[in-house]
Image (tube, rainbow, N blue to C red):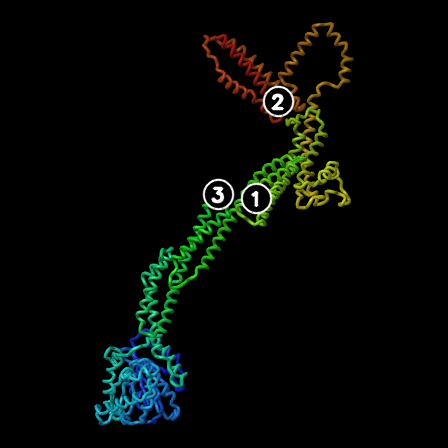
Amino acid sequence: MGDECYTTQLIDRDGVFNVEGLEQFVKAVRLAELGLSYAVVSIMGPQSSGKSTLLNHLFGTNFKEMDAFKGRDQITKGIWIAKGVGIEPFTIVMDTEGTDARERGEDNTAFEKQSALFALAISDIVLINMWCHDIGREHAANRPLLKTVFQVMMRLFSPRKTKLLFVIRDQTKTPMELLKPVLMEDIQKIWDTVYKPQAHRQTALSEFFSVEVTALSSYEEKEEQFKAQVALLRRRFFHSIAPGGLAGDRRGVIPASGFSFSAQQIWKSIRENKDLDLPAHRVMVATIRCEQIANEKLSHLACDKDWLELEAAVQSGPVSGFGRKLGSIIDAYLSEYDMETMYFDEGVRTTKRQQLESRILHLVHPAFQAMLGHLHSKALNKFRSDLEQSLKSGKGFAASVRDCSQSSLLEFDEGFADVAIKHVNWDASKVREKLHHDIEAHAMSVRDAKLSELRDSYQKQVTEALAEPIESLFDAPEQDSWPLIRKLYKCETVNALSRFANSLSGFELDQATCDKMMAELKDYAKSLVEKKAREEAGKVLIHMKDRFSSIFSYDKYSMPRVWTGKEDIRTLTKEAHAAALKVLSVMAAIRLDDKQDNIESILNSTLMDGLDYRKSLEAAADPLASSTWEEVPRNNTLITPVQCRSIWRRFKKETEYTIIQAITAQEAHRHSNRWLPPPWVIALIAVLGFNEFMMLLRNPLYFFGLFIFFLLSRALWFQLNIAGEFRNGMLLGLLGLCTRFLQTVMSLLKKLADKPRRHRRTPEPPQPRKLISAQTFMSQSQRQASFSGSIPDALSSSSPVSSKSGLEYSSMSTESQLGETNREVSSS
C-alpha cells in the first residue's frame, strides 16, 4: 500500500517548501489530468493525538505513527501529503504537525498557525482531531488556534465553504447528543468573538464553514471498535465532492493542474507575512480559473473547423474577406470567455482576457503573415507583367517602372485593408517596404538584362560593320590598309555610339553609368579590330606568299604568266619580295592612331638589302634583334622584329622553289626554240655548198626532186608532230617518233595484206545499207579511237607530247575510216 500512496514531505519543520518533491508527487499520481475532480483533506490537532493513525486507517496512507512504548514524542514534523488509496474521487491527504508541541516551546507557535492556515486555505475538508475531555474547557488545546484561523480566514478570503469535521477521540460514556451541542456552542462563541470587517459583521459561520462532529473510541483500548467506526467514517469520503457529499457545496475550486503552483504561492505568502496577511483567495482562484478557461478557448480555437478551413485556404492562396472572417471567429471565442468568467474578479478576468486575445492573435498571426505574403506576391507579379507589357508597347524603361511600381503598391494597400482585423493594429510597413525593395530589385534585374541585350545588340552591329571589311582589307594588305581601317573604325564607332546613346536615354541612367557603357562599347570596337589584326597576323606568311604569287606568277592582267624567256625573273623576284615585305610591315603592328613608325624602312634596310644574312657581332647593332619596335607600344605589337626575321627566312625558303621552277621553264622554252644551227655554221654551209647550189639551179630535175622531198618532209613534220615531240627533250622526242613511225608502218602493212584477200573473195549481191547516224558513228569512232590510242598511252606517263600525238593519229585514222564508209555507202 505504501507504494501506491506516494507519501511526500511537503514542508519541513523549518518551513522550507519541497517544490521538487511536490512536482514529483503531481507527476506520479498524474494530478494535472484530473481537472476539478479531486479533493484535499487535511487534519489538525494537538501533538500525539493520533492524527497520523486516523489518516492511515481512513485513507490507507502510511504516515509515520507514534509508538506508545517508546514515549510520546513529536512524530510528524512539518507537513506531509499522500494519495488516498481506494477513494473516489482522487483525494489528497495532508498530515500536519501537531500543535502545542514541547519541541517548539511555548513562545514559538508561528509555524503552528501558518500550517493551520495553510491547511484551511487549500483543503476542502479539515479534520479537527480533539480529545473528548477538552470539550467545554476555556483553554483547551485547539481553542486559541481556531480563534486565530477564523479571524484570518474571514478577513482575507471571500466566503469559501470549507468542511470542518470535528473528530472527538477516546469517546467516554457521555452520549454524543450531549457532547455535540456543547462543542457547537464553543465554536459559535469563538466565531462571535472574532473581529470581523464591516462587510462580514453579520455573516454567519455557515457562510464560511460547514461544521460536523463525529466521535471515535479509543484506539488503544477498543481497537476493533475504533476500526469499525473508522470504516463507517471512510465511506463518507467516497464521492465527497458530489452534491450532498462532505464537500459537495465547495466553491472556487483550484484546477488540479494549478494545485502545485497555488500551494507554493499560498505558503510563500504565509511565510513572508508574519501577521498572516494572505492574498485574497478569490483572486488566486480567479487567476487560475480564468487561465484555465482561456487555455480551453485557445485550444478550442486551434481545433475550430472554420478557423482550420480559413487557415488551409490561406496556405493555398489569397482569401477574399480574410479580416472580416477571422474577426468574427475571434469575437465568438472572446464572447464565450466573457460569459464563463463573468463571476470572477474583474481585474483578473480583464487581464486574462487581454492575455487570451494576445495569444489568439499570436496563433492567427502566421495566417495574417501568409496573407501579406500573398498580397506581396500578387503585387510583385502584377508589377512584372505590367512592366513587360509596358516595355513591349515601346514605352521608356524608367517611365514604365515608375507607373507600374505605383500601381502595384496601390493594389497592395487596397488588399491590406481587406486583410486587417479590428482587434489589433498590425503594421504592414515592413512587408510593403520589402515589396518596394523587391520591385526595385526586379526592375534592376530587368534593367541589367535589357542593358545587356542592348549592349550585345550594338556589339553585334559593330561586329557586322567591322569584321568582314577588316578581314577583306587584311586579305590583301596595302600601304593604305591601316588608314582605311582607321577611317572605317572611327566612322562605325561614332555611328554606333550615337545610336547607343539614344537607346540609353530611355533608361534615365546617371551620367557615370552612361559614360561607362559608352566607353565599353568603344573599347569593344577597338578590341574587335585588334582581335582581327592579331588573327590575320597569325596568317601573315600565307598573305605574303599570296602577294608574292600574284606578282611573280601572274601578269598585270591577272593571267598566269608563261615563261617565254623574255621575262626578267630577277626584277620580278625583287618586286614580289618587296610587295611581300610590305605585307609583313603592314601586319607587324596595330596602327589605330595617326602616329608614324619606321617598321617598313627597318624591314627594307635589313631584309631587302641582305642585312638579315649577316652575322652581326654586336646584337645591339641589329635593329631586328629586339622584341619591340621603336615608337610602337608593346600592346600594339603584332609581330616582333625577331619574329619578322624568322618569318622572312621561312618565306624565302618556301618561295625559292617557285623561282627555280620559273627559271627552269624559261630555260626549257629557250632550248625548245633553238632549231637552227649557229650563224657561223650557216655561213660555212653557204660557202662550202655553193657549187652544189649552183648545180641544182642548172639542173631543174634535181630542184624538182628536192622540192618533192621538202613536201614529204613537211608532211611528215606535221603528221608526226616532231616539234611537239622534241619539246620535252631529245630522248622523249626520239621515243615518241619511233612509236608513231612504227604505228604508221604497221597500219600500211596491214592494209597491203588485206587488199589481195578482198580481190579473191566471191562478190556477193549488194545489200542495201543504211546511212549511219552521226551519234552511232561518233560512238564507233570513240571506241576505235580508244583502241588505237592504247599503244601510245603506254608512254603517256613519261611523255605527254607523245600521248598527244597518239590521240592525233587516232583522230586521223577515224577521219579516213569515215571517208571510206561514206564512199561505200555512195557506191551501194
Binning the other alpha carbons within 10 Å of mark 1 as few (below 14), some (14 to 19) or many (20 upward) gives: some
Identity, as a three-letter code, of the amino acid under mark 1: Ala
Identity, as a three-letter code, of the amino acid under mark 2: Ser
The quarter holding residue 43 reads bottom left
Rendered position, 222 above or below 319: below
Q: Nearer the viewer, residue 784 or 617?
A: 617
The nearer-to-camera label among 2 and 3 is: 3
Label 1 – label 3 distance at C-alpha = 17 Å
Name the residue located 64 percent from the left edge and 38 percent from the top edge.
Answer: 487
471 left or right of 313 in image: right
Q: Which of 4 and 791 is in front in this view?
A: 4
Name the residue located 37 percent from the left edge and 59 percent from the top edge.
Answer: 323
Mark 2 residue element? helix
Question: Which quarter of the rendering shows the N terminus?
Answer: bottom left
Q: Where is residue 189 in the image (x, y as percent from the top left)?
A: 28, 90
Q: Where is residue 739 in the image (x, y as percent from the top left)?
A: 61, 20
Label 2 – label 3 distance at C-alpha = 79 Å
The quarter holding residue 432 reads bottom left
Q: Mark 3 points at which residue?
A: 394
Rendered position, 104 above or below 731: below
Q: Where is residue 816 in the image (x, y as percent from the top left)?
A: 55, 14
Mark 3 residue element? loop
Q: Nearer the viewer, residue 91 or 416?
A: 416
Label 1 – label 2 distance at C-alpha = 75 Å
- Which of the labelled discs sits on residue 802, or is there none? 2
Q: Name the residue under label 1.
A: 501
Judge whether residue 119 can be spotted in this image: no
